[in-house]
Image (tube, rainbow, N blue to C red):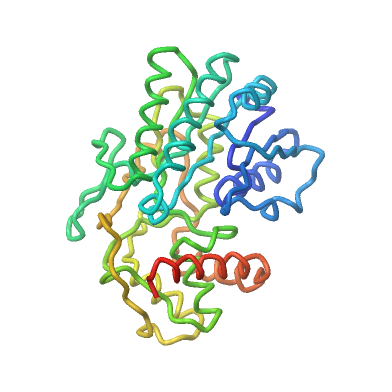
């Protein structure tokens, strides 16, 4: 077993918190330290109900080298979920993305290099850029990086840093690129939770432009199962792609949410498109499935979406405050 003590950076965020919850449930011996800066999208409520006997939470920044050193030398594995991850925010203010995604990754890499700790880097399909909407092409592990936004450019840069540290310094590390995740605990600025929150607040949901942009959807539980498979069976230096091959337009996703919530699917507001908006994402995860003996369980998107909506319906206090903050931000930006 590669891990007994794990440092999970960004462990109070959406995917990180789901990873922490899943691992503590399925491994009764593992000890986890969460390092999270608790920016707007990090929420201790995401993991507050978990036992503190095997979970330790440190509030701090992955750019803080002395703190990172202090924590990394006590663990076997670093799982890096910490990232600024919203395209809109990167267009408004790119600097935090450079700080966290580039300098933060560099800081972690230097620490795992010093203490010979295994490192896994959680990345995104957005580093590959986009594909034509009407094509059937998919991104592969060796696909060229062509990021479109400051967010995806900094994630691409962080992936390159990991590969450079593997080759130049011999660190033990893996990378994974995932398609769009959905599920519980996702902050309400992202498409699915934002639409759910908007409709449940008796407001009209919005889509950028025509809404025809296609995304490849993966339930977060399948993603964290895949990440655990990387820890157990992954080989250093390899890249793994996670996808459920579920490609839908943004408009279709919003319409499905409205239909499941009993609203008229045509009652949607189309707003000005995002600059440089990627058209289509699609990952080919076949090699990862074969290498890790991993397969997505949530292959029925409608069922996964229904479960996700039910979670937000029973956790209204969790999302209502955040939804109000996001609404104010969007009003200030003149989108409504």
Task: Decide: is 8 above or below 160.
Answer: below
Task: Decide: is 78 above or below 54.
Answer: above
Which of 307 and 118 lies nearest the eye of the viewer? 118
Please name the residue shown 58% across and 45% down the image: 16
Task: Decide: is 128 above or below 30.
Answer: below
Which of 322 and 49 lies nearest the eye of the viewer? 322
The quarter holding residue 141 reads top left
Please name the residue shown 70% across and 55% down the image: 45
Residue 232 point in image, percent of width and height: 56, 30
Residue 92 point in image, percent of width and height: 38, 54
- In the rendered view of the protein, which quadrant contains the C terminus? bottom left
The quarter holding residue 245 reads bottom left
In screen coordinates, is 148 left or right of 168? left
Label total for image: 0
Residue 334 point in image, percent of width and height: 38, 70
In screen coordinates, is 209 left or right of 99? left
Residue 285 in view: yes
Residue 307 in view: no
Residue 199 point in image, percent of width and height: 50, 79
Task: Decide: is 168 above or below 330.
Answer: above
Please name the residue shown 47% across and 30% down the image: 103
Q: Residue furthest front?
A: 332
- In the rendered view of the protein, which quadrant contains the N terminus? top right
């Amino acid at each position: 077993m590669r891990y007994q003590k794990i440092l999970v950076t960004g462990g109070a965020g959406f995917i990180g918190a789901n990873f922490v919850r899943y691992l503590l449930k399925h491994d009764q011996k593992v000890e986890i330290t969460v390092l999270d800066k608790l920016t707007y999208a990090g929420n201790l409520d995401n993991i507050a109900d978990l036992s503190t006997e095997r979970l330790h939470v440190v509030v701090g920044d992955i750019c803080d080298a002395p703190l990172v050193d202090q924590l990394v030398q006590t663990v076997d594995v670093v799982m890096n979920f910490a990232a600024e991850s919203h395209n809109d925010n990167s267009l408004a203010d790119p600097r935090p993305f450079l700080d966290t995604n580039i300098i933060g990754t560099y800081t972690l890499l230097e620490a795992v290099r010093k203490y010979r700790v295994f490192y896994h880097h959680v990345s995104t399909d957005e580093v590959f850029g986009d594909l034509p909407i009407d094509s059937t092409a998919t991104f592969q592990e060796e696909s060229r990086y062509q990021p479109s936004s400051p967010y995806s450019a900094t994630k691409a840069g962080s992936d390159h840093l990991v590969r450079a540290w593997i080759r130049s310094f011999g660190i033990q590390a893996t990378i994974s690129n995932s398609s769009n995740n959905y599920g519980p605990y996702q902050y309400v600025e992202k498409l699915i939770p934002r639409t759910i929150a908007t409709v449940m607040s008796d407001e009209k949901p919005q889509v950028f432009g025509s809404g025809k942009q296609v995304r490849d959807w993966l339930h977060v539980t399948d993603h964290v199962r895949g990440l655990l498979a990387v820890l157990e069976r992954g080989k250093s230096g390899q890249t793994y792609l996670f996808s459920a091959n579920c490609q839908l337009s943004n408009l279709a996703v919003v319409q499905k949410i409205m239909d499941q919530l009993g609203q008229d699917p045509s009652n949607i507001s189309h707003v000005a498109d995002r600059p440089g908006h990627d058209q289509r994402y699609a990952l080919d995860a076949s090699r990862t499935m074969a290498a890790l003996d991993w397969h997505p369980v949530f292959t029925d998107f409608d069922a996964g979406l229904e479960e996700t909506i039910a979670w937000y319906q029973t956790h209204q206090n969790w999302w209502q405050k955040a939804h109000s903050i996001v609404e104010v931000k969007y009003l200030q930006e003149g989108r409504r």
